[in-house]
Image (cartoon, grey):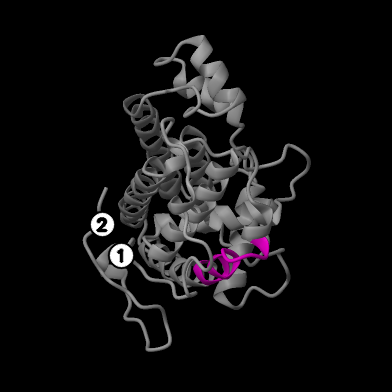
Amino acid sequence: MKQGKEVENPESRFFAVLLAAAKLPGVRIHREAYLRTALARHCTEDEIRVAIEETPAAAGITVDVLEKAANDSIRYETAKVSALSAAAGIPGILALPATVPADLAQYVGHMLRIAQKLAYLYSWPELFSEEGDDVDDATVGVLTLFFGVMFGTQSANAAVGKVAGMMSEQVAKKLPQKALTKGVVYPIVKKVAAYIGVKMTKESFAKAVSKAIPLVGAAVSGGLTFATYLPMAKRLKKHLAGLPLANPSHRATQGDVVDGEVVDGEVVEEHESFVTAHAEPHGADTAVVKLEEPRS
């Protein structure tokens, strides 16, 4: 999953954008600092300490408190990404590879920000190492699956549930490296990456067209960002909040996680993440798609 020179196929394109966005200033969220800030208004110091040292679930923080904190973060990130989209300017732009459009990188950067925040609230471990700019393959894998959930793919939902189940069973504080890089989850990571790579191309094209008209184009671009980012963030929040990993009363049993293959490698889209006006028909060789109205 390392970034290479060849980014022509959708899977490589997605990984190239993801890795480039992860290196932008301000994209990586420090878990301890975020949890302390997000929970400060709602929790005691003891609860915050346990949430940081272990998890919010272990601290017994209620579902209502977590939802309030999650919604605050979603509102903040949505407003920020929409404003930046309209302004079409981001820090660190000169460091981007020539193959990664700046507006797409900043959009993905904000997807990474909200994915990290929601993951930490719902008891996932620190995703990025503090050492250097490199992103390990397990982190790339789980972030890809988070993005798949945001884009509405049922296969990603199942795979994230599998990974969460493994961590819940083992009371683990790290991502299951083998499952995400070599095991049964890895083929789904690759399929989801290819699927999102195609979708990103459509989205980037839609923004380019909207920006061809000065002023009005900026408003259209910002509105398009808002229309896609908000429901995707809510979708990830809903899925992570419903996993056993986020439930302090849950004790994993063998029946909670199905052994063997999670999915057969087919990426199934539960509902269209992008505005209908920019949707394109799928060919016979693409993923099976079931379209529904986006749900919050």
Taking depth in this image into account, of 20 and 49 the one nearest to the observer is 49
190 vs 78: above or below: below
Measuring 64% from the left and 51% from the top, which residue is drawn there?
176
Q: How many marks?
A: 2
81 vs 180: above or below: above
Taking depth in this image into account, of 49 and 131 the one nearest to the observer is 49
User: On the rendered structure, is 84 left or right of 170?
Assistant: left
Q: Which residue is mark 1?
A: 272
In percent of width and height, residue 189 lies at 56, 65
What's drawn in magenta, residue-wise?
181-192
The quadrant the N terminus occupies is bottom right
Which numbered dot is residue 259? none
Corner quadrant of residue 90 = top right
User: On the rendered structure, is 97 left or right of 157?
Assistant: right
Measuring 25% from the left and 57% from the top, which residue is drawn there?
294
Corner quadrant of residue 250 = top left
198 vs 23: above or below: below
Measuring 59% from the left and 78% from the top, which residue is drawn there?
9
Q: Which residue is mark 2?
A: 294
List the single residue furthest toward the right: 132
Q: Amino acid at mark 1?
A: Glu
Taking depth in this image into account, of 197 and 51 the one nearest to the observer is 51
Residue 21 in view in this figure: yes
Asked if the residue under mark 1 is in contact with the one under mark 2, i.e. CB atoms within 8 Å, the reply is: yes
Query: Residue 78 lies in magenta, yes or no?
Result: no
In percent of width and height, residue 208 lies at 43, 65
